[in-house]
Amino acid sequence: MAHIEKQAGELQEKLIAVNRVSKTVKGGRIFSFTALTVVGDGNGRVGFGYGKAA
């Protein structure tokens, strides 16, 4: 597959969901986050990303 450079203005990105989860431990709460993002060019090409952070 050929790698094609896109201009910065050609892609649209949409944040679909952000989820915050807390885990209670002896010292308090630990928060972690997840995020789902979709990116596309508006012409049929779509990609998604699912990220996690603690």
Image: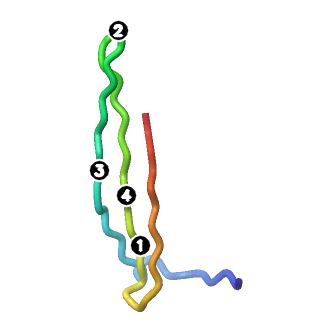
Q: Which quadrant of the view contains residue 13?
A: bottom left
Identify the residue at image location x=30%, y=13%: 28
Whichever of callouts 2 and 1 sits on the residue coming sooner in the sequence is 2
Check the image and name the residue furthest to the top: 26
Check the image and name the residue furthest to the right: 1
Q: Confirm or deny contact between disc 3 and disc 1 (CB under 8 A).
A: no
Q: Is disc 4 surrounded by few (<14), some (14 to 19) or many (20+) residues within 10 Å?
A: some
Image disc number at residue 25: none
- How far apart are the two marked residues, 2 and 4, measured between alpha carbons? 30 Å
Q: Is disc 1 surrounded by few (<14), some (14 to 19) or many (20+) residues within 10 Å?
A: some
Whichever of callouts 3 and 4 sits on the residue coming sooner in the sequence is 3
Identify the residue at image location x=30%, y=29%: 22
Q: Secondary structure at mark 4?
A: strand
- How far apart are the two marked residues, 2 and 1, measured between alpha carbons? 39 Å
> Would you name the residue on which mark 2 appears?
27
Q: Is disc 3 surrounded by few (<14), some (14 to 19) or many (20+) residues within 10 Å?
A: few
Check the image and name the residue furthest to the bottom: 43
**Which amino acid does the dot numbered 1 rest on?**
Val
> Would you name the residue on which mark 4 appears?
36
* Image coordinates for residue 23, horizontal then vertical, percent: 33, 24
